[in-house]
Amino acid sequence: MQAGRSSLSRYAATARLVLVVVFALGVAPPVKAEEKSSLNGIALVIGQSDYEHITALPNPANDARDVVKLLTDLGFEARGVTDRDASKLKRDIERFVEDAEEADVALLYYSGHGIEAGGENWLIPIDADVSSLANASEALVPLSEIMDELKQKVPVAILLLDACRTNPFPPDAVVRRQPKASGDKVTAGGLAPVRGAVSLKTKDAPANDNLGTVIGFAAEPGQPALDGTAGETSPYASALLRHLGAMEGAEFGNVMRMVTEEVYLDTRGAQRPWVNESLRRLLYFGVAQDEPAGDEAMITGERRELLLTIADLPDVKRSQVELAAAKGNVPLDSLYGVLRALGTNEIPENPADLEKVLDSQAERLTKMFAERDALRTDDPEIVRLASAADTAIREGAIVTARQFLDQAVARVEATSGAVDAAEDAVRQKRLADAAVYIQRADAASLVFDYAAAAGDYGKAFGLVEKWDEKLAWNYKNMEAEALGAFGDNKGDKAALDRSIKAYEQILGMLPYGEQGEDWAITRNNMAVVLQTLGERDTNDAQLLQAAEIFRESLGVFTETKDDVNWAAAQNNIGNVLLVLGQRRGDASQLNEAVAAFRAALEKRDRTKVPLDWAATQNNIGITLYALSERDPNVARLTEAQAAYRAALEVYTKEAAPVQWAMVQNNLGNTLNGLGNARNDKTSFEAAADAFRSALEVRMRDTFPIDWATSRLNLGNTLTHISKFDLDTALLEEAVTAYQDALQVYTRDKFPMDWASAQNNLGAVYQTLGQRTSEVRRMEESVEAFEAAAQIYTRDALPLDWAMTRYNSGNTLQLLGGMSGEPARYREAVQAYRDSLEEYRRDIWPHQWALSQTGVASTLLWLSNSEEGTQSLVESIAARRAALEVLTFENTPVDWANAQNGLGMALLNLGTRQSSGQHLEEAAAAFEASLRVFTRESQPLQWAFGQNNLGDIHWNRGALGGGNAEYAKAIAYFENAKAGFTESGYVAPIAITDQKIELIRQAMAAK
């Protein structure tokens, strides 16, 4: 930059800037109001529109004109320049930097083309072309040099850059500072973070008492910004013009946050500015332009509060609002206003609940905007208030909108006595008055005051009932919907009952005997309320009634060729059948639910309604998984997996992160089911990956309940994976996952989830006890199951009670082995038999079979402490009963374990009774188990199988088979030793060697 000074003044000297500087450091006191001082602020505003060799930009010149006026009104000595070539642009900036030395605040605003290459941001003069890139230091203007010089000369430097348009040069263009320097490729769009904008520490403050810098980009680093509608100002400039005036009462950082979110809303999420502040003190600008007055002031005031609220929302919640706004084609501003009116603490934590709220409110907004034409009045004040309310809702100022509408209703009520007696005038008045009530009701719905909304919809219905049948029908529908929403949200059965009565009244308004589309839609809406009532009642009558109504509507929608409502009705049928099937344990209803969802997919074209299509795919996956829980089936689980993966093709992490995480979690559960069915470690590892993916979105501070659910599911998966080796690291990680879940799932708030986590914790403690032979772990397991049983009582939750009794039986059986106390085995047998009282073979065949194997296993161990054979006989009977259900095809691991247990009981019985027949049956059972427990897949289980076959041949040799049988026994024992070695479990090898030695002694004695 030039060192010389010109004698001409380049800035108007009539306005001065008042700057309030407040220390942000903990050791420094804030500056009081009376300590304000008049400080000098200068600004240079550049607008580059008329480019000679690259794409021209219509709006930067407009931006510059309006921003100069704004900054002048704010007290800056502001100068604006437009369409500057390289030499003029550099001279303007040099003079600006020179004059900054006498200023307290220097602000540079640039609107035009800008590029980034090699970490440097370059401002583009209007005479630049491709050849300019070969000598950038001469032909372009580097931003970092401007910033570095300003930091040395002025306490506060502010750079606002609306220069993030897409790259105007060829895609392969490179920038060279000098002709012979190395080149850096120009990025495709957007500028990069300015490297010089780093936080300034007190001890490092420069001698000129520099307070830091503010760098504001019109878009996030690397992202292009929009130029806006030709002839107007860019979205970034428009936001600055609207909100910089708030600097009189708001700290500058907050003002820039308002600007950021204003652009975000104005572009429907397509552009979001980026700010890098390195200020060591808070900045307040005390002289401001004239702020809006009247209605606009009220709207702008609430909107600014909304913008700051949006700034604090995490991206994952933003994505849900964006998705709902896109689906409903409603303004982002309005939906964010709805959330703000709800209150930060009341925003649903569960993503599914939040999605339901947003979709419902988006639908209300759509209806509300569509019905504005109903307002026809000759009262200009009501027209003004209604129009202001409409503007406020579109800008997210919901509370302000209600205030306008309260005033409008007050005027309606004040003038109602002066209605003209003429019939037509009365009709017009009543319709107009009703429309005002409707507007207030809509606004009440947006802030979830459904009770007030229902009251106003009812009043509107009363006003138009005798004047306009169509409006009356619409308004009564709105009242019914509001009552249904109130009953659903508050759990108010009386409101749901009133909603049903309202729908019945609506049906009565239709011509007698007519069963057209209006009839079908009304009944469908009524059926949704019946479904809500039915889900909260132990009686299935209302669920069945809802399903019947949905089915009846299908014929109407078929006749009218209304594919959208036909598919929605099928989807609703599937939802009802899913609830009924899970409640009753009825596979036929679950299969009907799958059929209904698949029928819906025939009309839900992925290309036209992708989100509805994906939702139905997810529903199919949930229902198929529910079927597999009742009766494990690999084919069904594979179908569920395919449905989830199809949903994930639409629900991407970027476009719909909450739904993506939900489906990832559901997919993880299904992969766990496949792992169990196939005895497949790979499936379990894929399940763990799915849950970890879900947890990338389901973070504890954002979605604590879903975070706890996925942590719980991850713990289950880690427990499954741990079965494939003897390490305890995965089990300890599973314990941590369950304990994490219990931090959210407290007994008082989430009793069911708390009990589930306790049950799973008991299971992993059980496995740890087996691995470490620690009685303490087994006792912790028993305690955890007993804790779960405090919630899972037989009267309230019979199936969960049966599960807990089964799990307790497993732990008590193991404790019996560790303690050598037969009483523990007897407690275990009783626990298993308790579970069989609820696990009926005809309804829950798989769980029934597993409980039978538990009885059998425990009786086998108990028989070792008894002289008789009764326990062995009962054990064999229980195993054989279980094997009538467990098959190699459907449940290979459980089948193989049952075969192995049967073989052990037959071996012991054959040994005690010296029965060759029992030994033959035992050998067949052991051989069968090895179809699953192969040396390659599970060497430890295979080794135990070889050991058991060795015992069979040893016994045969002792019963007269001679040395040939002894030799086979030794061969099997040697195989077993190799398997124990390969699996890393060497403890049984010493005992196996002793067996081999005893056999050799027997062979030598013959």
Image: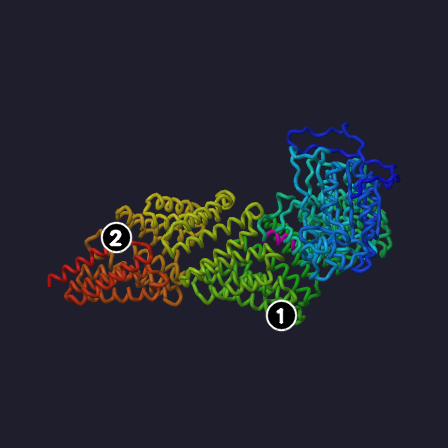
Q: Please tell me which residue lies in front, 153 or 444.
A: 153
Number of the front mark, 2 or 1: 2
Earlier along the polypeptide chain: callout 2 or callout 1? 1
Q: Residues within 10 Å of mark 2 (few under 14, many from 20)?
A: many
Residue 59 is one of the magenta-drawn residues? no
Q: CA distance from mark 2 to mark 1?
A: 63 Å
Please give the residue where the numbered disc 1 appears in the rendered image.
Answer: 555
What secondary structure is marked by label 1?
helix
Q: Quadrant of the C terminus?
A: bottom left
Magenta span: helix, strand or loop, mainly?
A: helix
What secondary structure is marked by label 2?
helix
Give the magenta range. 352-359
Quarter of the figure with residue 153: top right
| CB atoms of marks 2 and 1 within 8 Å | no
Tell me, for residue 862, which label it has, or none. 2
Tell me, for residue 1000, which label it has, or none. none
Quarter of the figure with residue 868: bottom left
Amino acid type at image mark 1: Gly
Amino acid type at image mark 2: Leu
